[in-house]
Amino acid sequence: MSGDVARMRNIGISAHIDSGKTTLTERILFYCKKIHKIHEVKGKDGVGATMDSMDLERERGITIASATTNVAWAGHSINIIDTPGHVDFTIEVERSLRVLDSAILVLCSVGGVQSQTITVDRQLRRYDVPFMAFVNKVDRVGANPFKVRDQIAEKLGHNAVLMQLPIGLEGAFRGIVDLVRMKALYFDGADGETVRIEEVPAELAAEAAKKREELLDAASLHSDELMEAVLEGRPTEALIKSAVRRGVVARRLVPVFVGSAYRNKGIQPLLDAVVDYLPDPGEVVNRAVDLDAGGAERVLAADPAAKTVALAFKLEDGPYGQLTYVRIYQGGLRKGDEIVNTRSGQKIKVGRLVRMHADAMAEITEASAGDIVALFGVDCASGDTFCGPGLNLALSAIHVPEPVISLAIEPVDKTAADRVAKALNRFTKEDPTFRTYVDPESNQTIIQGMGELHLDVYVERMKREYRAEVATGMPQVAYREAISQKAEFDYTHKKQTGGAGQYARVIGRVEPLPKGVFEFANEVKGGRIPREFIPSCEKGFRAALKKGALIGFPVTGVRVVLVDGQYHPVDSSDIAFQTAALAAFKQVYLKAKPQVLEPIMKVSVEGPCEFAGNVFATISQRRGTIVSSVEDGTFSRVDAEVPLAEMFGYSTMLRSLTQGKAEFTMEFLKYGRVPANLAQELTKTTESRT
Amino acid sequence: MTLTVKEELIKRSPLRILERSISGGLGRGNIGVLASRKGVGKTACLVHIAADKLLQGKPVIHVSYASRVDHIMTWYEDIFKELAKSPKMRSALDDFDELVRSRVIMNFKQDGARTEQVLRSLEAMIVHGSFRAETLIVDGLDLAQAGLGDLPLFKDFAGRLGLEIWFSASLKGEEPLFDDRGIPRELEPCLGAIDVLISLQHHGDHVHFNLVQDHGRLAPKDLRLKLDPTTLLIAKDVRPRRPGL
């Protein structure tokens, strides 16, 4: 199967929570004969959908880690990455987007474009991923795929065009009209496995003709040939398909398909569309930076004969050891090949090579450019690049956000401690947004992540996968400190009593740096501080930033300008200047009017209109600012900015307030100033602790 | 006593001319309407009015019936950028984030949301959301269609919650749009619920503001304001007074 790039597809399935993404994936596996029985996400049979391989995902009915799986359809090899829908796990989504060539955006035909859809759309945009839309759940009460198409056009700004019409809606949904072939498709058999092709029902003929017009109009923009054929009144199926494909690959057209995964309707045509309209790895431009050429950009060729370049995008700890998922961009991987991890410089021999199907795997001997496979027994971190001998490239790093929340954990007993360490080691390798360290003061293990749920899931996984039970403290917000005005320092560090002396003097100023973490400028003239000690000063200032004097959190947004100083020919040293800088910063810090900053989250709450008032109240009680609210008669969405510190327990509260009818998403937006009275309280608690 | 840059900006705003012409401003409990054909610049004027309130530290709710909200946010950004054109002003306006904290955009669907429901949501925002707005901007509601029944509801709401409400009204009818007193013919049936009515009209290459009704009195008057075609800000009209008005 390896080798023919044109017959490969790497697709992701992205969606809002509960749009039925996992159900859709499950059906795709079934129709591609990878599984022989269909399980539901919240299955009554206790088995759960095949893609949710972790117990926890089965229990909560959500998808956390993106398992990749390979299927065959119409002579093509399709790698599917199932991506999580919850915002707390966006790193997983981002990581999969990096290795995908295209995506299916799943939308609910009742909910339409929801807050998470907007997030996912933004991510697809960031990585220039072409996609098509699947409007699922056409059988649900209130389904309106036409409205959803309009929303994709209006709210997301895409040139969305219907490729199909539903035959009947809600409970009466029976089949689909294919607007390219102008045929009606019905899905027979117990699991909808037989596609029956018939004429378009008479009552839909007029509408189908009209929608086909729209499709031809949109598609012919991408092909002069089709435009001509349309004018002459004889557009062919092949011409339409190639025009749509061109539009999709250029990200200028979004074809919209309809169906109901749960009812087994519309899946096979969607798979045909993956083959017909989504790009193969050779049609997508991928770039890497050349580490031997000062970071110059190189375009990779999806050519099996070229030298190998591959990206480790996901690690998983299975029962047989560490599994590393890699996307091969160039060249190929063969059992016994030698490759180099360009981050560590380590040479690795390719051992076992497997193709994944959720939990099951198939051993293979080689894989080539464009493919996604997994390696056994390779020690690396997620995000590492592997190259063939003679190449030293790095695939651009995936955007990794800083963690905003931390939690102290403590193993319940001695035996658990070892397992906790093992689990943490694993998780930090798998997920770059999950971090851990030991607080030197309290001696506690701290874990950090992107939200409450994110950390909850890891605590649960420790328990289930590593039998490591831990007690947790209160979640702690990752505050920052920052100065608000310019201030000058002049500090002399002197220790010249007996033995080797120390002497260093630093003069300069600190300034707020609103859009950055730290900047150091050296304006010392005439060698008043010898050049070799300038880096020592910088190091000293950097060390000082690690812990602010207000509440002990890192200081951010500081520009230090070193203007003048003094040295002693014998007693000045690296250490002396570091110490002077550190002390100078401590001295000047309070003069620069430091403030406490807190993470502000972008919060989106969606639910029926009748709860809008309650939602407004919950936001304002939480020191939030409502940015906008949108109501369309039945449904409302409130967008707000709320400090993370106020968001603990929000999901439980919202659920009980709205009888579970409203949901919210949240992501980090920016750091904002903590109001003076609260900052004072924080300072007080810090003082009382020390 | 010297004024701060911000105070200076507020004092010199052409909107002070507008306020002087309508007896000191629209005032709480009152309804103001800007009427013109589509595409003349009503939204720009409303955003300018709102921005002026925000500068004075007064919260504003912007009610929009457009299909998306992001372009309204861009309007505000553009207007503040325009106001901050001179370097002296920039420092006064650099905290754009802080200014827009006093603004909420509420978006409703024209055919989906009934005015009773819209007012319920607005009240929820003001009362439950603790958002003490003084000014309400309502843009894009089809007044001529909804006017007779809905404008009195807004008027009552304005009185009850102590708000001043500025509307835009798109005139769609056939020419002549205005009767001989300058009143938009489509709005005649609901004139009773309107306190201040201003029409925007093209004269040559500029858009001019005519005061039609001032707090219940029919008082046709050229406001000597124009819409600057490049900045889309309301500006003083310095040309000689046209005869006949």
Image: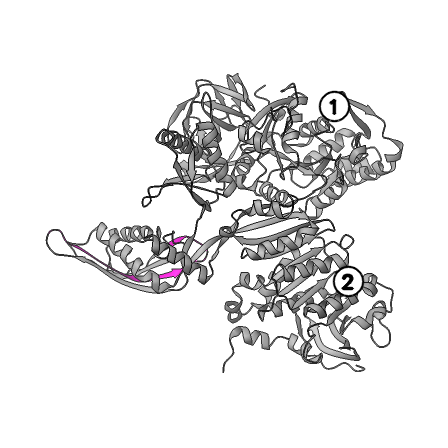
**Labels 1, 2: one chain:** no
Q: Look at mark 2 in the image and give the residue it sits on.
A: B38
Residue A504 magenta-drawn?
Answer: yes
Q: Is residue A557 visible?
A: no
Residue extent of the magenta highlight: A499-520
Q: Is A507 positioned to the left or the right of A250 in the image? A: left
Residue A2 figure quarter: top right
Q: Is B177 positioned to the left or the right of A577 in the image? A: right
Q: Chain of mark 2?
A: B
Front residue of A240 and A622? A622
Residue A35 position within the rendered picture, expressed as x and y whole percent measured from the top left: 63, 20
Residue B83 magenta-drawn?
Answer: no
Q: Nearer the viewer, mark 1 or mark 2?
A: 1
Q: How many marks?
A: 2
Which residue type carries mark 1? Gly
Residue B210 against residue A471 in the figure, above or below: below
- Give the position of the N terminus of chain A as an image quadrant: top right
Residue A311 against residue A526 in the figure, above or below: above
Q: Which mark is residue A220?
A: none
Which residue appears at 77% of the width and 56% of the height? B114
Which residue type carries mark 2? Lys
Q: Residues within 10 Å of mark 2 (few under 14, many from 20)?
A: few
Residue A108 position within the rendered picture, expressed as x and y whole percent measured from the top left: 69, 38
Secondary structure mostly seen in magenta is strand
SS for dot 2 = loop
Q: Is residue B101 visible?
A: yes
Residue A586 position within the rendered picture, expressed as x and y whole percent measured from the top left: 30, 58
Q: Are marks 1 and 2 in contact (CB under 8 Å)?
A: no
Residue A193 position within the rendered picture, expressed as x and y whole percent measured from the top left: 73, 21
Front residue of A210 and B35? B35
Q: Look at mark 1 in the image and give the residue it sits on.
A: A192
